Every structure is written in C-alpha cells, then in structure tokens.
Amino acid sequence: MLPTRPGRGLVGREGLPGALLLLLLFLSAGRGDTGGAKKANIVLILTDDQDLVLGGMGPMKKTQVLMGHFGATFANAFAVTPLCCPSRSSILTGLYPHNHLVRNNSLEGNCSNAAWQKFQEPLTYPVYLQKQGYQTFYAGKYLNQYGHPQAGGVQHVPMGWTYWLGLVGNSKYYNYTLSLNGHEEKHGDHYEADYLTDLLTNRSLEFLRKLLRPPFLMVLAPPAAHSPWTAAPHYKSTYSTLKAPRNGSFNVHGKDKHWLIKQAKTPMSNSSIQFLDHVYRARWQTLLSVDDMVQKVLDQLKSLKLLDSTYVFYTSDHGYHTGQFSLPVDKRQLYEFDIRVPLLVRGPGVKGNKTYLEPILNIDLAPTFLDIAGVNASQTNMDGVSFLPLLVNKVQKSAWRSDFLVQYTGEGYTTRDPKCPKLGPGVSQCFPDCVCEDAFNNTYACVRTLSAANMQYCEFADKENFVEVYNLTADPHQLSNIAKSVDPSLLVQMNQKLIKLQACSGAGCRS
C-alpha cells in the first residue's frame, strides 16, 4: 500500500475529496506536465558501507552494464566522512559535517534528533523538490536513530517526503520495523514477505505503477552491504571460495600512523582473517539483491516510458575495509578504502560508457538534484556543487575543484571495553584480540587534493597533534606517512588549506 501522507501530499488538500482532486490534477496537468517546462525525474539508489577500492562493485554485474555502459562512471567519488549518519546527513543537506553538526550515529551526536529535525530537515533536498512539484518517495534506511522514541518515533515523517517508508534504526534484513507514512509496520523473518532489499524493490515498483504524474524523486536505501550481512536464500551459496583481497595494505602494520592504527596486531590472527573473509563474501552476497533491484527499477521505468526522462544515480554512503593495516572490518578511517565510493549516473544528455576523473563529493548530490529540478543551488546554503553541467558537457573541466575536506569525530566509551580492557577507556568497536577500530581521539580533518599533486594531508585532534601525509601517486596504498620527510613549506600550505576548509560555509566551500 502507498497511501499519500495526510496534509502533506495530494489527497485531501484544500478540502477537496481525494479522488476528485486526483482526477482534476490529472486532467489539468497531464502525465509529465508540471505547469511549465518538463522536469526530469530523479532516482537515487544509496547502498550502505559499499566500498570501491576493495572490489565492492564486483557483484554488481547488471548495474555496471545498465548504469556504467549506458551512463557515466565517476572514478573519483568520495564521502566527506566515513560513517553512516554523518555521511547520510551530508547527502541530504549538501553540507560538510562541520555545518550540519552530525558527529556520529548517536542521538547525542545529533543523528536524527530533535535539533536535526528542527534545523536541518527543512533544508534537505526533498523539501526543495517537493516545492517544485515533485512527488517524492523514500524507502529504506534513513538515519541510524530514525524512529527512536526520543526522536519522535515512527510518527515523525521527515519534511519533503510525499510517500515515506523509513527503516527504524540501523540496517537489518529481517525482523525490522518500518514507518509507513508515520504508522508502524512490523516485519518478521519470512523471505518472500520480509527480506528488506526485495521489499523496498517491490514498493518502489508499486510507486512507479501508481504514479499520477511526473516529475518524481525516488530514493531507495537498501541495507546492503551493512552488517548483519544476511543474504537472500538463493544467494547464500555464491562466492563460496571468495576471499578478501590480499594486496596493498592488507595485513600490513601501520608503523608510522596514528596510534589507533599502530595498535592493530600484525600479522592478524587466523581467526580474524577467517572472520573478515566471511564478511567479505557475505557483503558481496547481500549486494546481489541490490543488483537485482537496479535491473527491476530500470526495467519498470522503461516499461512505463519514463527511463529517457529520468536521471538514475547509484552510490554508497562511504567505503569499508577488511584487513587493511590489520584492522579486521569497519570504516571510520581517513584512507582511500573508507572514503572512496562508487558513483554511476545515467539520464538525459548523459553519454554512455564514459568515465569522469573530476572529484565528486557526496555533498554534491543535493545541489545536483536541485539543478535538475530547476533550482539554483548556489542561492542556498549548500556546500556542494552541482555536477549536472559535467554530465551534460556544459562546464570546463579545468574549472572543477581540486581540493576538498574529509572529517571525522571519533567515538569511544567512557569505561573500559571488555574486549580490550588494557587500552583503558576511550576506545570502541573493539575485537576480542584487542584491536579497536575507533577512539575519542580518532578525530581528524584532512585535505584531499586531486590535481597535479595527488596528496592527502590530515591533522588529528589529540595530544600529539598527529599529522599524516601521503603522496598517492607514488604510494597509492598509503603505506608511508611522509609528514616528517616532506618539504615543510608544503605542510604549511596544506595546513592553510585545511584551516580554510574547516571554516568554510556555503559559497566559501564551493569556491
């Protein structure tokens, strides 16, 4: 069922009976007419924890053909922070974390709490698009604390969404709760009725079939490839011999890195390696259902003669690692495997089978959606830049950005982690062999530069003011921190860039 939200959508507005209002709108507007120039539709498929560097697109065979062959691939797409809620908040708002103020996945860290709902939700991209006449549909994971009793529960439906099917809490595949336009919908563990990725696919197809008129915005946010890594039954035996990649920084000691990385044990224990291999396989298995989702959505658009007037975006909220620098499995780090993401786009005016090298950030998605809808994003407070001109060849590539910001606020427990008591309080995400993936002072800000110099410069907020610097042309796996050997004038230059980026807002970030 896809009921329209009372008071927010079409049904019942201005006191007219719902059916009569729908008929009048259909007759007066016509399919595809929004009262002016026709606007293109937008579909965003947003995965969870899907890396690019370590082969995360490997299982996406259909997607690579349907999106890559018939559209554009961005080889240098980045998340501006490697954690779910802050990253998704950046996608929604077009803002760097220091401007939307979501620090982590907790209510205390501003994840979907009352302050976020009051100050940031009114400025998210669906609000702008809905004002432009778009029907808007969201299905899947939103923000990690969505649906929490202290954040309005399932009754809270974020602004801007005509049809809302939001997952309560973090990623799950079975035994979850959804908010269906503000009403609780519970699901169990029966595959055909409850497997979340497939349910989201089916609800999206239903939305498209019942679509009154374009333009529309449809966002699908499946749980894959996030834990608990539950594959659909027919995919559980695939990739049975697959192992995590052993090249690059796999099982390498981070001898010159921040203390959190240096504390990881090298070589890893056999049990850790077996575990991360299992996770790597399971992640690929869950993504096969997302690959099916992409095909079914595109087939539905084609059958409804909507494909040629729809921009389809495929990306992830951030990357992931499995054994790099002897860290078993997680994200949260500044390295390429955690911040690079897949990004593929097809749609009107987009040339097929083309790869772009310009750096695109997840804060650029919202301005791009506004641009497609005819809204001048430069008149908003968004930090990102529309890359629609790149897609349709209306901008000089030399005018594109070369520097951008990556930032993260570390999390730790105030008491000792029972899995690693010897490290004391302040760490989190620990494994039984006392390898911890996060800490309070795993808080950093980086300048990433892609131009003649392919560099990364990072400063940590800790007692040491620790610095990491990498030349990714010479050292693509970031094995050697050159902070102590590089020309000091370069460090000064990068530090000044970082200071400016950390203080930027709106147009200051875009320039």
Image: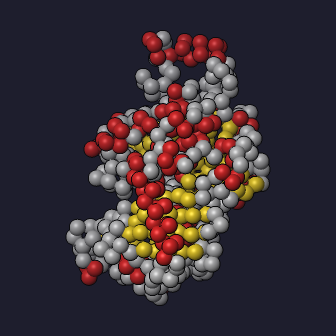
Query: In percent of the image, x 53 and y 69: which residue is there?
Result: 456
In this rendering, the answer to whether 43 lies above or below 84 is above
- Which residue occupies the foreground of this view, 44 or 368? 368
Task: Confirm whether residue 330 shows in the render.
Answer: no
Taking depth in this image into account, of 440 and 406 the one nearest to the observer is: 406
Q: Residue furthest left?
A: 415
| Coloring basis for residues | secondary structure
Q: Residue at x 56, y 59 (%)?
A: 403
Q: Among all residues in the image, which is located at the extreme front?
A: 489
Residue at position x 37%, y 79% from top? Answer: 259
Answer above or below: position of 489 versus 67. Answer: below
Residue 71: % across, % down: 73, 49
Whole-percent x and y of residue 55?
62, 68
Residue furthest out toward the bottom: 267
Residue 189 or 77: which is nearer the viewer? 77
Determine whether, in the image, residue 131 is placed left or right of residue 261.
right
Placement of 297 over or under 404, stated as above or below: above
Considering only vertical position in the picture, is 25 above or below 217?
Answer: above
Residue 5 visible in image: yes
